[in-house]
Amino acid sequence: MTNAVQSVPLLDVSRANEPLRDAFLEVLSEVIDSGRFLFGPDVVKLEEEVASVCQVEHAIGCASGSDALLLAMMALNIGPGDEVIVPSFTFFSSVSCITRVGATPVFVDILPETFNVDPAAIDAAITTRTKAILPVHLFGQCAQIDRICRIAARHDIPVVEDVAQSIGAAYHSRPAGSWGLAGCFSFYPTKNLGGMGDGGMLTSDDAAMADRLRLFAAHGMRPRYYHQVVGINSRLDSFQAAILRVKFAKLAEAVRHRQENAARYSRLLHKAVAAEQVTIPTLDQAAYHVWNQYSLRIRDGKRDALRSYLSEQGVATEIYYPIPVHRQECYRDESFANVTLPETDRACAEILNLPMFPELTAGEQEFVVEKIGEFYSQAARSAA
Ligand SMILES: *Cc1c(COP(=O)(O)O)cnc(C)c1O
């Protein structure tokens, strides 16, 4: 049979949402009828559901993953003069939460196999000013969070996990977001549990931390109109929570589809291209990977040429991330110029993220890999 696929999108959220349209409309009309647009029952129930999959006592809704990270910094009383250890190969928010409270990010390099932060580099970066360690569970796979937590415990430093891309992931069977003092989640539409707008959540097993997170997310106000601390206004609204609960019920199944798709990509790529040219993702044996992204390394400086070829052929790809956070323009006046992170730089130059979502079809994946194979066979012919 010939492949009828003409183009493949990076992500098509409507394939997940369309079959759920009636369920969405039903829960949204319940929210309208209730009149409880903030702090409604769906927010409370979603908090309970996320706490339960993460096996923690407390979950606190907030307005975004970025706010979750910022609130964790605020609740830990982190500020000027304090250092927070963080990777630079991540989305901006993992770092902006640190500089936003006036503290200093101390950047550490990643492991080339998984793109996740290197625990040994964290250990070496600890000083008397270190106030927190902020590992990121990148692309759906946990960092070596057991080692990171052991290092942190030895120095009595809190760990804040950035779980924005990895809800439902685990390490040694223990859920992401349950290892550190706090876990920070995002419901941005492209995440594994994606809403129809912004949303976020914090998890914690520590009652005092959970209480401070709630306080800071609500203007530091307790009781009403009496402000104990200068907090922010960051809430998950009832409409988003209602939508997210419908999708939450399908999360485990969606993750299984992502895992099947990842395995299929790896099988197909293994046959189509040489491992020296295209490196397929490495699975950490301790990790339950939830595949928010399927990330290749494209060797020999061919990444951008391959990406243009795929784009011409109708295959959308993305580069997460083209430049490390410490080199971003907004930090040009900071003292990060002498930070050297060779693996981070190499990842930025080599990484290519393929279309990945639960409803991606086998035919679409075959099309993607066929086009990658074509790029290399044409290159081989023109070199001959
Ligand atoms: C998406 C993301 C965030 C931010 O989440 P938002 O909900 O978009 O604010 C933070 N960290 C990482 C690693 C992310 O991928």
Image: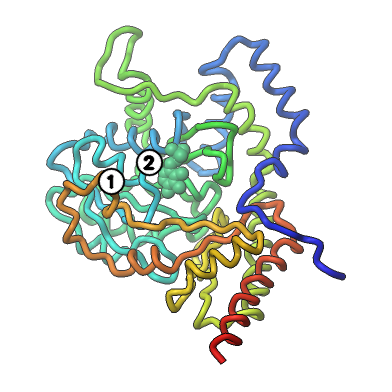
Residue 378, percent across and down? 61, 81
- Residue furthest out toward the top: 225
Amino acid marked by disc 2: Ala
Looking at the image, residue 67 sits to the left or right of residue 319; the answer is left
Callout 2–callout 1 Cβ contact below 8 Å: yes
Q: Is residue 213 above or below residue 157?
A: above
Q: Which mark is residue 41?
A: none
- Disc 2 C-beta below 8 A from ligand 1: no
Residue 238, percent across and down? 57, 21
Q: Is residue 249 above or below residue 144?
A: above
The answer, for residue 264, to whether it is visible in the render is: yes
Closer-to-camera residue (88/223) = 88
- Residue marked by disc 2: 182
Looking at the image, residue 302 sits to the left or right of residue 216; the answer is right
Closer-to-camera residue (357/50) = 357
Q: Classify mark 1: residues with Cα within 10 Å, few (<14), some (14-19) or many (20+).
A: some
Q: Which mark is residue 158?
A: 1
Q: CA distance from mark 2 to mark 1?
A: 9 Å
Q: What residue is at 59 percent from the left and 60 percent from the top?
A: 311
Q: Is residue 52 above or below residue 381?
A: above
Q: What residue is at 46 percent from the left and 76 percent from the top?
A: 299
Q: How is the image coloured?
A: rainbow
